[in-house]
Image: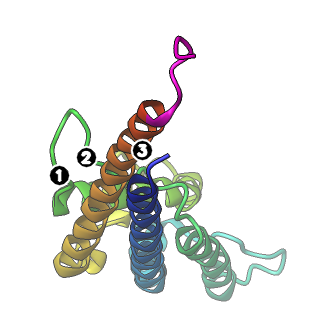
Amino acid sequence: MSEATWRALAHARVVLSCESVFARLEMRSRLAAIADVVPGQLATVALAELEPHGDIGADSAGVRGAGRERRLDEVTAAIAERIRTGIDEVQWPVPDEGYDVVLTVDVAAAVYGFVAGCVKPLESLVVQHAHGRHDERTAHRLLSPRPFFDADAFTALAGLLNLVAAAEAAVHEAQRDHDAAVRDAAPDEHDG
């Protein structure tokens, strides 16, 4: 067995582990930042959508404003929590045969797609209480990417995802080299 190839493989694995940790930390940070912004945006737009349509969550006494806002707060808080903890639900882009590197736009699209899916409960609530005035554009009105699109943060995350991919490739190459060295060092069955 080649000690040099074993060391190279061990080093490549450590680098991959470190790059993966850094990428996941940035993913969590980005999702937390979005979770801090999106609920307020959603509540504002949802209230505007529902204003002419009456209340959601009104109690039997007919308390409208407080009931509506309380229900919106509940739904948007649940959405924020799902976004904050959804790191493994996002379809994070990886370089593959389709493209060589992860771009900022790839990360933004993955995050936006995930967040848009998280907004479905609020969209359903708006549809339920909009009395026929809802259309398919409500989701787009509910969730504008502008408040949470941070090009610098998405670019940094794309860079980290590219580093993880490069580290994975280095591990595969080091593993191949090590396997070849082990095979070459093995005694030939025909000797002797």
First-in-chain label (3 vs 1) = 1
**Residue at which label 2 appears:** 95
Q: Residue at (46%, 36%) from the top-left corner?
A: 185
* Residue range (magenta): 185-192
User: Which residue is under mark 1?
Assistant: 101
Give the mark toward the camera: 3 or 2.
3
Q: Residue at x 47, y 62 (%)?
A: 10
Residue at 25% across / 60% down in the picture?
Answer: 162
Provide the secondary structure element on which disc 1 rests. Answer: loop
Quarter residue 141 falls in: bottom left
* SS for callout 3: helix
Three-letter amino acid code at the position of disc 1: Val
Q: Is residue 106 magenta?
A: no
Identified by mark 3, the residue type is His
- Tag 1 and tag 2, C-beta contact below 8 Å: yes
Q: Pick the residue in front: 31 or 10.
A: 10
